[in-house]
Every structure is written in structure tokens, then in C-alpha cells.
Amino acid sequence: MLHPVPVRLSPGRRLTQLTAGLALYGVSVGMQIEAALGLAPWDVLHEALHKITGWSFGIVTALTSVTVLLCWIPIKQKLGVGTVANVVIVAGSVDLTLAVLPTPDNLVVRLVLLVSGVVLNGLATAAYIGVRLGPGPRDGLMTGVSGRTGWAIRWVRTAIEVTVLVVGWLLGGTVGVGTVLYALGIGPLAQAFLPFVTWRPRVEGDVGAGGGARTGH
């Protein structure tokens, strides 16, 4: 039985994968927004703040990211190039997607757009996490709190996302079937894609990224 193995990427290819992953992440968020069937917990909050302030969704996303990064200070998390790129690239990609992608009138098309957006989000998440160039602001908050408190990551993530979801919903963000689909699907999807896009260092004797795939049972 053939198993995927972590890919061996040069520094340039790691940066390319990081950029592509973050750009696709923003596209996937835009797709979920235009499906108008409910958003991921953080995006429920982003949408609510977008409605309240009148600022673009991307700007709200970036400013929220900066605010979350300030929360890294007491938990002593360290920035990576991927962390900074996350703030900039996702924000720009979301706004560009919203500028060119309309909300479909047909419910079936909206459902397809929603499901496609969630699947793409899973791939994009795996792609930018897999290069190991620094966590996104929200992921870093989760792992940092877990590390400082000793609480399990799953409980920290649940607590943060439920809090964000409730606050966003109370402020007017969209909660719906898309919210449930995202909550149930994003973890398994990202985990399924990770083996195909995770970087590992080259070691002596490697034959390169294109060869040497191992097999096992």
C-alpha cells in the first residue's frame, strides 16, 4: 500500500507554497462569504465587525489578526515569516475574491460554492501549516494558551472559537449550515491534506522531492 510522505521543499518552494496556501485560504473565505449560508467562527466575527465599521472584510481580518498577535505577548509566542504573511496575504486575497465573485441566486449553486470553499480551506490550511514557517495569529494563540496552561489544544480551540462565534453572532455575523459544515469538516480535511504538503528537511542520502517514495503495509 502506497503512503504519501512529507515533501522535501527548497526554501524558495516553501515560500511559494506558503504564499499560495495563504492566497487560496483568502479565496476560500471569500467563497464561503458569497455562498451566504453561514461562516466559520472567526469569520462570523469578522463579518459582524465589517458590517459595524464599514471597512472591507480584508481590513477587518488584518486588524483582528494584529489584535490577536498582541495577545501573543503574555504567552510568549514567537513570530515567523508565515505569521506576518498570514496577516497581509489573506486580507488581500479575501477582498480581491469578494470584488470579483458575486453571490449566486440559485441555492444549489450556493451550496456547491460553500462546500468547495470549505474543501479549499482545508487544502489551503494544510499547505501553509505544512511549510512550518510560523503559525497564523489564531493558531498561535491556540497553541500558546495550551502551552502556558497545560490544557489540551482541542479544549482551548473549542473555547476560543465558541467565544468568538457567540460574540460575532451577537454583533450580527452570519451563522448557518456553513458554520456547522466548517466546524465538522475543517479538521478532517486539513489532516487528510497534510501528508501531501508537509515539508521536512533534506537529509544526506535523499534522492529529492520527486523520488524515493516509500511503501509500507
Image (cartoon, helix red, strand yellow):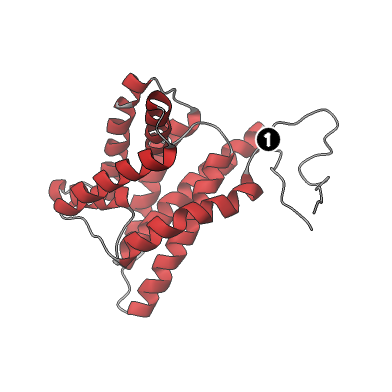
- Looking at numbered disc 1 in the image, what kind of residue is underneath it? Arg
In screen coordinates, is 163 left or right of 52? right
Corner quadrant of residue 149: top left
Q: In this view, does 60 lie above or below 69?
A: below
Given residues 132 and 182, the one toward you in this image is 182
In which quadrant of the rendered image does the C terminus lie? bottom right
In screen coordinates, is 136 left or right of 166? right
Please state the horizontal and vertical placement of residue 77, each as a whole percent of the image.
Answer: 41, 23
Residue drawn 21% across and 50% down? 166
Given residues 120 and 147, the one toward you in this image is 147
Please state the horizontal and vertical placement of residue 56, each as a whole percent of the image.
Answer: 25, 48
Residue drawn 53% across and 40% down? 129
Corner quadrant of residue 133: top right
Please state the horizontal and vertical placement of residue 17, each as a whole percent of the image.
Answer: 58, 43
**Residue pointed to by mark 1:** 200
Circle 1 — which element? loop
Residue drawn 37% across and 53% down? 96
In which quadrant of the rendered image does the N terminus lie? bottom right
Regarding residue 195, the answer to whether it shows in the image is: yes
Please state the horizontal and vertical placement of residue 47, each as a whole percent of the image.
Answer: 24, 52
Corner quadrant of residue 118: bottom left
Given residues 198 and 14, the one toward you in this image is 198
Q: Is residue 29 above or below residue 112?
A: above
Regarding residue 31, the answer to whether it shows in the image is: no
Disc 1 crowd rating (10 Å Cα; few below 14, some 14-19, many 20+) is some
Farthest front residue? Answer: 151
| Number of marks in the rendered image | 1
